[in-house]
Amino acid sequence: MRFLAPVIKVLVLIYLMSCACVSAKTPLVFPAKSTQKTVLKIYGGADKMEIAPFLSAYQKSHPEVQIDYYELSTYGVYREFLADVKNPPDVLLSSAMNLQVKLVNDGYAQPYSSEYTNKLPAWGKWRNEVFGFTYETAVIAFNKDFLGKEVAPSSRNELLELIRRRSEQIKGRIGIYDITQVGIGYLLWAHDREQSSSYGRMLESFGYHSTRVFRRSADILKALSTGELNIGYNILSSYARTWAAQHPNIVVVQPKDYTSVIMRSAIIPKHAKNVLEAQRFIDYLVSVQGQTDMANFTNFEPINNEVRVKQKHLLDISEGQLRPVPLGIEILVIDDQMKRQIIIQEWESALIEYL
Amino acid sequence: MNSKTLPSIRRQLLTITIALMVIITLITYFMANNYSKNAAKISYDRLLASAALQIFENTNIDYHEVLVDLPSATFETLSMASNDRLVYQITQNKGEHLTGYEGLYGHILQKAGDQWQRAEYDPRDNLLIQFWEGDYKGENFRFILLSDKLYEVGESFDVNILIGQTTQARDQLAYEMNLNVIQMVILTFIIAIVLILIGVNQILRPIYSINKKIRKRSPTDLRPIDMSVPKEMADLISTINHFISQLEVSLNHLKRFTGEVAHQIRTPLAGLKSQAQNAIEESDEKTRTEQLNRVLYSTDLLDSTVTQLLNQATLAHRFHSQPLITLSLPELVKSVCRDVAVSAIQRGVIITYQGDENLMISGDSFALSQMLRNILENAIKFSPQNKEVNVSTELHSTEHGYIARLCVADQGVGVPDAQKQHVFERFYKSKGDPRAGSGLGLSIAKEVAQHHNAAIKLLDNTPSGLIFEINFPLMLTEDEH
């Protein structure tokens, strides 16, 4: 057995190294553009490639700042932060509203208000501790080939009517997020459950038509573009529009009965080291300049009305009803363990048997 | 003048009323503060209670397990306190976690101990709703704990619903209500102060006008003040008027007195002058000697009159400046008797004294000696040769208590009853009385007696003569203590 020892040693070493790689997250470092530097540490739920141009734009006006961006999953942002509360980043960016609200509600955030944050709409912030800086809508995407000459349904009722009418073509060809795995998917589904009178019929209809569940937006959109899926429900608008721009056979519809809105939001943790820099970053995030940069360099939807009008984004807010997922204690209901259990059970018992 | 000027009435009135206003304002403020806190507490407690009840309505037994389906409306209701944080936990039986913030129930139960307060209203029987307010993780939270039982065939579960919310919104509500109250109170306060200022000025106006009226008067104008004043000041005015009339009487008195004095002095002077002239012209040695003796006699008389006048002035001054002291009446009487005894014997009159020891009265010894001396000299003067003047002091009991009685009795001709009342008048001399006297001695004696609150009386002696009886209020002797 003695000869095994070096092998085990190597294995242990490899294991330790891999651990080190996983736990000691490696940030994406944006070095300061001038000599005098201060470090802004951000935990973000957004894709590096997505947010990098925006962070670079920030450095143009703040050249002395070095940004260490840690890309994490939305749940990762929450978990990594709680793992070491006394040694937090300066800013938490996340689209998991329920988790952000929970952090604020549990007293982990510090308040900040400035002329910039005061301009946010009432639904765009809570307690001056969490600030929404971009929002996304949940849209319905269709395969154009499937629709043919038909006009895309513009509301949930029309969607259900279409499904019922063309039931045979639709079996196994609806795609939604796996709410047991995708946080946003759960949030939007639970929000639908509270908002929609058609929720029950939808659940039944989706179940009957062997709806497929996915863990990534891209997978749904890819399947839509290849014709593997005909309908994608509650897809985040930013991804849907990017794909639609590249794949003309994808049609994006924003339901007119109501449109769910989720926000990416920012928090300054209570024990943040570089509070001043974090506050300047928050100001930038919600300022006209920051929002314009965001609109120009990312596919994030600016929350600021003025910017939206200037940029002529795809979203027309006058069309349909925006129903933001609330940034406040109402969201605690959605986040409740037992509620989650009830919703997921309901969802699974309707869908899983057809999988 | 040694009297200090007291603080002005206006200032006193203002100080008192403003102090009163401040106290009332403070009391009102504290009551209002209490009230608004309570009102805010009740309304937000109701919100919490309705939330807990809603949750309970949505708690059911499902396949032998308690299932809580949180109603979203509940949290929407609670989010009316838009900036308040919320924590909750729902447990079953002895605190086993169902949903919410795990560990909260046990933590708060332990922290609150027995400080839970039962809700003042019970929406339903058998339902226990309790409140507790305290610190949770560095912020003030209001907790509600609803406990009830759920029944299903053959089984039952205790359900505990614990909700805690920070108190920002209720504090804000209380603060706003309070602010309204403070504004009201300040407004009331200002109005009251203005009214008080006006009122005090109104009240004090008569005082100023009286002052002005008196100040404008000439010193010789002794007419009474005639003006309409409030009831409380009418007394003051009538006192001032009384004082003015007294002053007038005194002035008239003084005028008369001065006239009399001038007259009394001038008459002997005129006599002196004519006697002296007569003596110059008189060639007969014997007659001239007689005339000169008369001049001497008149001079003596004048001298004694002036002395008495001076005495009277001295006494008047003493009465104003000397306080009365405790003294022994017998000691004083004996000392005066000894002083006049020699001159009495020269006139063939014997003075006897008999009296209780230790009669203490309060008095001015100089003035009392003067009084007694005048009475004694008067008695000696009117005593026939070889008669006695009996002086006595004694403790005397009356219906009002004990008094010290001083009696001087002579055996002269006495005074007819009709003349007794005039004996004490100034410059009074009994008609046809040839003996020298100023006519002032007895009037001085009476003044002194009055100053000592002593009653002076004239009584007839038997078989003839006069008794002066003077009754002093008694100071208790040492023994009687």
Image (cartoon, helix red, strand yellow):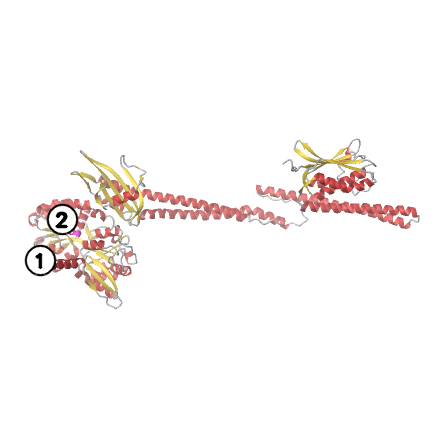
Q: Quadrant of the C terminus of chain B?
A: top right
Q: Which residue is mark 2?
A: A158
Do we see residue A198 in this rendering? no
Distance between the Cα atoms at labels 1 and 2?
72 Å
Q: Helix, strand, or loop for circle 2?
A: helix
Front in this rendered view, residue B28 or B295: B295
Indicate the quadrant where residue A115 lies: bottom left
**Is A180 a magenta residue?**
yes
Q: Residue furthest left?
A: A168
Q: Give the label on residue A84, or none.
A: none
Front in this rendered view, residue B205 or B99: B99
Q: Which residues are magenta?
A: A178-184
Q: Residue at x 82, y 42 (%)?
A: B436
**Is B454 a magenta residue?**
no
**Mark 2 chain:** A
Q: Position of residue A298 (x, y in %)?
A: 19, 61
Do we see residue B112 in this rendering? yes
Q: Position of residue B22 (x, y in %)?
A: 46, 47
Q: Residue furthest front?
A: A2
Q: Are marks 1 and 2 in contact (CB under 8 Å)?
A: no
Q: Which residue is mark 1?
A: A2
**Is B330 on the left-hand or right-hand side of A57?**
right
